[in-house]
Image: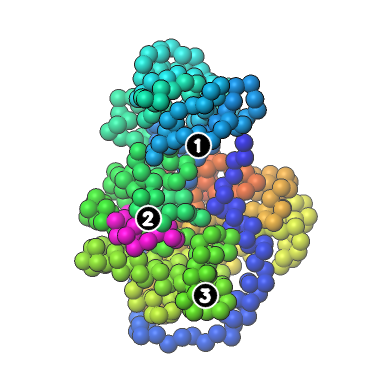
Amino acid sequence: MKKINNDRRNFLVFSASAAFATLFLGVKSVIAKKSETNNPTSEADVANARLGINLAGIKDWSTEQPFVDFFHMSRDWVSQVNGVGWGTGPELELDENGWIKRLAKNCFATRIICSLEGNQYPSGEYVILYDGEGEIAPTNGFIKENKAGRMVLKVNAAKGPFFININKTNPQNYIRNIRVISPRHEQTYQSNPWHPDFLKRWSGIACLRFMDFMKTNNSSQITWEDRPKLTDAGYASKGVALELMVDLANRLNTDAWFCIPHQADDAYVRQFALYVKKNLKPELRAWVEYSNEVWNGGFHQNKYAAKKGVSLKFANETWEAAWKFSAYRSVQIFNIWTEVYGGHDQFIRVLASQASEDYVSDQILKFQNAASKADVLAIAPYVALSVPPTAKNGITEKAVEAWNLDKLFDHMIKVALPESAKWIKNSKKVADQYGLKLVAYEAGQHLAGIAGAENNEKLTKLFIQANTDARMGDIYAKSLSIWTQLGGDLICSYNSVENWSKWGSWGLLRHYSDLPANSPKFLASIKWAVSRGQKMTM
């Protein structure tokens, strides 16, 4: 079973293939003249820097495990034939919510509840609840109680992944609404779907960015009917229902940053805004962004925007067309939200761009005067070291694999941090020019192999070791200090809790049960947030 962070992996693969485009942008950024706009240049707002977080996506190998109902995080059904290899069964007949309506003869279906190995999820008594009639058989654990609609299962996480099989189901009253409640939460899961440790960890955070929660990248959602729903069998495929995201923001008393799917039609946008206006606490703000990294050629949203931009004759070159369409569609979305809210004081209008290229930001902000309909310019000023197999700025896979931690941190301090600071400074100038605040939609360390170098075990080991080192905490502290000094506002770290691998060490913590003391970058981030007045605990 392949377990990767597809979103960030796509970005890394694209980074290696975009050398020519980057060169082009570098030349253009030098020769481009600053555009004249209708926005008067004003004194920059006093920085109100605060810490936000990108929540890790929902999947069966999630190490954050935010829900007490593990079925929410489970993988889609696998159709099986008795006595034959994995996944060889016929196509399953599912209802509109993803529940199996009937099974073919000699077939069964498997649901991967949690695929983590080695005690990476809680052991104990799980309660499996369901409606309908049939036969459910778990693959891990000792059944203590089994009666219609309810099973009590003693699970030992040391034995590895946790699956359940549906061996029989009554087509007239098929098994549905399965819940797999983690130990000690049967009495509370209906009133509070969130794990108390998850709520405690992010209490005091300034903003929750739901990009991965919403499965924003490469989304196929178009109409409101396509959206994730509370009644969906699980949330790993389409993302988390809006109702739950608003509920989480309300419980934590924090702003909510939403990424509108790139193909969403106007009716979708309007219904989304109507729900948020009605249900998000009035003292909280919604942050509204069109998709995620539309400038990034590794994502479907970039190709969609490029095609749309060319068809509208915004530009002949696909990359430029994508930038301009992102501005165009963003403003359309902002206008719908403004109509719903009767103004734009209660939500934040986000125009996002590429941190390393202020030329791109300028092109987006000035297109059809988009900046005049926005509130913030958002960038991702990572402290970055992307290592390709072949030479790039003197960096090669073979060279870096021979580094020790001293050499790596020397590079981060002398090269990566100043580079990030340069991106922030240049982006702040562009934001100031258009009268916008500068925020970070993502941030943190960005150590990763790309274009094949991610398979280098020496690199992976080096980068994972670096993320456990006390000096990584220093890097985060310095980076956050630079952000504050250069006038940055909200900065959303990428990401919350996620296992580290060859695809990157993105999580501030690796695992839900990690002690904060074992993650210097988590400690540094929370300490900085507390220094900014946020009531967070370490």
Alpha-carbon span between mark 3 and mark 2: 23 Å
Badge 3 crowding class, 10 Å Cα cut-off, few under 14, some 14 to 19, many 20 or more, is: some
Label 3 residue SS: helix
- The residue lying at 35 percent from left, 53 percent from top is 224
150 over 267 or under it: above or below = above
Q: Is residue 52 magenta?
A: no
> Where is residue 234 shown, x and y percent of the image?
43, 37
What residue is shown at x 39% (from left), y 68% (from top)? 330
Comes first in the chain, label 3 or label 2? 2
From this view, report whether residue 59 is shown above or below residue 494. above
Q: Position of residue 81 (x, y in %)?
A: 59, 25
Task: Work out how far the residue at label 1 is from the one at label 2, CA to CA, in angstroms.
Answer: 22 Å
In this figure, which residue is indicated by the disc labeled 3?
310
The reply, left or right, for residue 122 in relation to residue 436 is right
> For numbered disc 2, what is the local secondary structure?
loop
Q: On the image, numbered disc 1 is attached to which residue?
A: 76
- Mark 1 or mark 2, earlier in chain: 1
Disc 2 target residue: 223
Magenta-drawn segment: 255-272
Q: Amino acid at mark 1?
A: Asp
**Residue 516's spot in the image, x, y percent?**
48, 40
Give the quadrant of the C terminus: top left
Give the residue at x 50% y 34%.
Answer: 92
